Structures are given as structure tokens and as C-alpha cells.
Image (tube, rainbow, N blue to C red):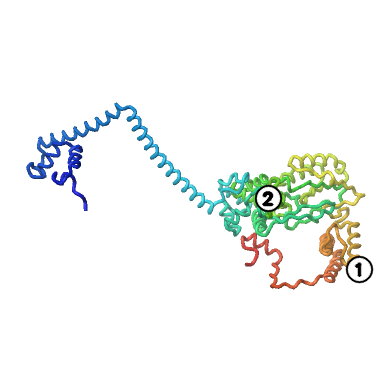
Amino acid sequence: MTPPSPSSVPDSALTREELYARIRASSKQEVVLEEMQRLGFWPRDTAQPTVEAQLIRREGELQTALRDLGDELRGIEDRETALKAMRKERMARARERREETRQRLAQQRHARALDWHGRRQRELLYLGEGVSGGLNAARSDEQALARHALPALHDATDLARAMGLVLGELRFLAWHREVARVSHYQRFTVPKKTGGERQISAPMPRLKRAQYWVLDNVLAKVPVHEAVHGFLPGRSILSNAAPHVGQAVVVNLDLKDFFPPIGLRRVRGVFRQLGYSPQVATLFALLATEAPTDEVELDGERYFVARGERVLPQGAPTSPMLTNVLCRRLDARLAACAAKLGFRYTRYADDLSFSADAEHGRDVGKLLWRAKQIVASEGLVVHPEKQQVMRRHQQQHVTGIVVNDKLSTDRDTLRRFRAVLHQAERHGPQGLHWNGQHDLIAALRGYANFIAMADPARAEPYLRRVKALAAKHASAPATLATPARAPLPAGHFRQQSAAGLAPLPT
């Protein structure tokens, strides 16, 4: 229930203090007028107030204003009190503004956090220090992509959908860390034929799946120079050696440390030139490169510490084809240089081969100088210890194939192969090795298949003998407590990965 207003309460019902407060709020005359109207001694509901009533009310208003001005004047006359009141008022206003600012900033931070969280679910905005530039640009050149029939992908969401991945998994595979607890690669070494060891970085299945998608859906559709024979369908070491058969002079050069000089920036540039947006090009480059790492252990935990920039790993399925695409200008320049001097040119991975007839073979010195200048200008280096110039009276070979008169295998190597195979047949494979490989049967089978590429008729008896040797010395399969998963068909993993499907059955 609403309490009555002071004017509706009779003066007899008010205390002394309440009555004085009522008079101070207006004026004595106005209080008397209100009481007379309440008691019926003065008309209340007239359409036009009387002059007396107006004067009384106006007098009350003026008295109230004068009283307020007097209070303000007394405050001004008391300097310290006035300053204190002003400071107090100013501080109160400042507190109000600070509180308003704090609440506004908190709301803005909350809104930004919500926006960032939402964008993280839809986009990849950051993938690590030093590699995230350009992730905000997500518009590809569809006309440029259409020229090579490449998939039109604008951003990370498009790429993840095409690969059959969720966005979080794509972020996990592409994320760059200087120190990490997990590695997407298995690292090991294999012996080189010429001595020493080769560092191999083999991708784990999830990353390998993404790399196969990039290889078959993007890189395999990009044309390369006609002189290239490595890692291309329908081409091999035989097609690489064939143009050099019967030439007067054959020159072999080897590119030193072929993959390490090719870093993240150059790989990203390849995909940008194809027409992909900076965001997609960065993702492709991160999936195809890795930083060399050292494995360390601290407090029982294993860490992988980066010790350099990201480069093409030797062992990733994307690395050979990326080098083919990156070397298009190198191949064009070397081919033009060779043709100008009357030489033929082919390349298989990091092996450069040139050949010419007797007339043009006299310019071999000029060819070597120009070729090394071109290689150096492309940021690569010719291995100084692997340069070979072979004349007709010598055994000429290109990528392991003898090319003097026809494509054939090296006689000395074949003689060693027969000797090792004979020893294994007589005494067993224990204690024997082939070209530094201690899995003798697998190594012999590999070389027999190599012979079959050059001379199938000659290789047939060797293949039978290796097969018999493997059957004779095959170890009994271990008995498993649980049934083993059936092996996947050949090429199944790659085909499923390229189609954006899970390669392994669940």
C-alpha cells in the first residue's frame, strides 16, 4: 500500500520535525495554503488558479532556490570545504567512469574471446611462430587452378573437407613447434652405395595420408620438364638412361644435399604460383616440410627439439615431386645449355646426365663450367666428388645402367651378385650382406628386380634362385595371441588417401 503524501496528512498527525521539514521543502505560506485547501477553506479544483495561490507557490519556489543558492554560496565562501566537495564529486564521477570502462572492456574481451573460439572452430588462424604469415588471406585464383585441373580450395576448411579430415586434425598435422613431445616422422639411416649413411624421415600414417593427397591431387597434375625421369608414371632409370646409349662421351653430375636446401618458403611459393591462397599454400608447405630435430630426454619425458628451418624431408612421398616442380627452371636452363653445345640432358632426382657424339664431346669442359654456374644460381651445389666424364673406351653408365652400346647392367656388379647368391645357396644367408644391407634375401631380390628392368631374359634365372633361397630360409611365422589384421592390397593406402577416405579399416 502506497504511504500518503505529506500534504494529505493533517498537521496534527505530523511530528514537529516532519512539519518543519515540510515547511523547509517549500515555504510556510504554501503549507498553510495546502492545509486550507485540504480542510475546505480555500477552493482546490478551480480551472484557473487564483492570483493569491500562484503568488504563494511562486514565493515557495523562490525561497527554495534562495536557500539552495545560500548553501552553495556558503560552500564557496569556505574554500577548503568547496574544494573538498569538488574533489569528492570529481572522484565519484571518475569512479563511475572507471567502472563503466572496466565493464565495457570486460565485455569487449569476452566478445573477442567468443569470436576467437568460434573462428578457431572454423578457421586456422595460427600454426606456430614464424610460419603463420598469410593465414588471413583465403582466396585462391580459380582460373589459375583450372589451367592445371587442380582442386579449387580457398581455406583450411575446404582442404580438411577434401582430405577427409576434421579441422583439428589438420591443425595438429600442420602445427610448427620448436619443442614438441610428439613427432610426425620416424627417423633412421640407410647405408649409401658409395659409403656413409643417408638420413631418412618417414612420415607416420596420418601425415603420410595427407601427403599422398597432396601428391596425387595437386603435384601429380603439374607438368614438369620433359628431361625429368624420376618419380613419374611411365618413366624410370631405364628411360633416363636410354637417350645416352651409344654416345661418345657421357657426363654425370650429382647435386649435393638435394632436399635440405629446399625450405618452407620455396615450397609455399610453388603452391602460390599454382594459384592457391596464402592460407592453403602455407598448409601445403607445412604438411610437406619438417625441421631437422634432436631427440632429447628430460625428467623421463622425451622431447623433439628443432635445430634448423623446415625443409623437404627425404622419405616423404611429396618431396621428389616437389623437387621436380621446383626444378622446372633449372631443367629448362640446363636443357637449353646442353642443346646449344650439342649435348643431351636428362635428370633423375639429384642425378644430372649429359651425353654427346664425338664432334660435340670436345666441348665437355665448357658444358661443365656452364652447368655448374646454372646449378649454383639456382641455390644448389654440384657434389665435387661425384663428377664423372666417361668416354667410349670406358664403361659408361647412367643411374646404374650401362649405356655403351645398349642398356645393360654393370658386369663387375653382376659378377659380385652371382658370387654372393652362390655363397648364400651353399652356406645360407647368415653373415653375408649385399651393398651394405644385412637383410640379404631382400637385398638380393631387389637387385634381381633391378636386372629385370634392364634385361628381363637375363634376370629370370636369378629371380627363380632368389625366390627358392627365400623359401628355403624362411622363418616360421610367430603365433599371435590375437588374430592379425589382413594385409592391405598393394596401393590401397595411397588410393584411399588420395580419395580423402580413411585408408585403414576401423
Q: Residue at x 34, y 28 (%)?
A: 80
Q: Residue at x 88, y 54 (%)?
A: 405
Residue situated in front as seen by the camera: 383 or 275:
383
Q: Is residue 73 left or right of residue 267?
A: left
Residue situated in front as seen by the camera: 222 or 85:
85
Residue pointed to by mark 1: 426
Which callout, 2 or 1, points at the residue further toward the start of the chain?
2
Q: Residue at x 91, y 60 (%)?
A: 415
Q: Is residue 259 left or right of residue 174?
A: right
Tell me the SS state at disc 2. loop
Residue 276's place in the image compared with 459, above or below, is above
Residue situated in front as seen by the camera: 81 or 474:
81
Count neighbours of disc 2 (C-alpha within 10 A) and say few if under 14, some if 14 to 19, many if 20 or more: many
Residue placed furthest toward the left? 41
Residue 291 position, x and y percent, is 69, 48
Residue 112 position, x and y percent, is 48, 47
The answer to whether one can see residue 203 in this image is yes
Instruction: Give the residue type at disc 2.
Output: Thr
Count neighbours of disc 1 (C-alpha within 10 A) and say few if under 14, some if 14 to 19, many if 20 or more: few
The circle on residue 289 is 2
All told, the count of numbered labels is: 2
Tell me the SS state at disc 1. helix
Instruction: Give the residue type at disc 1.
Output: Arg
Quadrant location of the C terminus? bottom right
Residue 474 position, x and y percent, is 82, 70
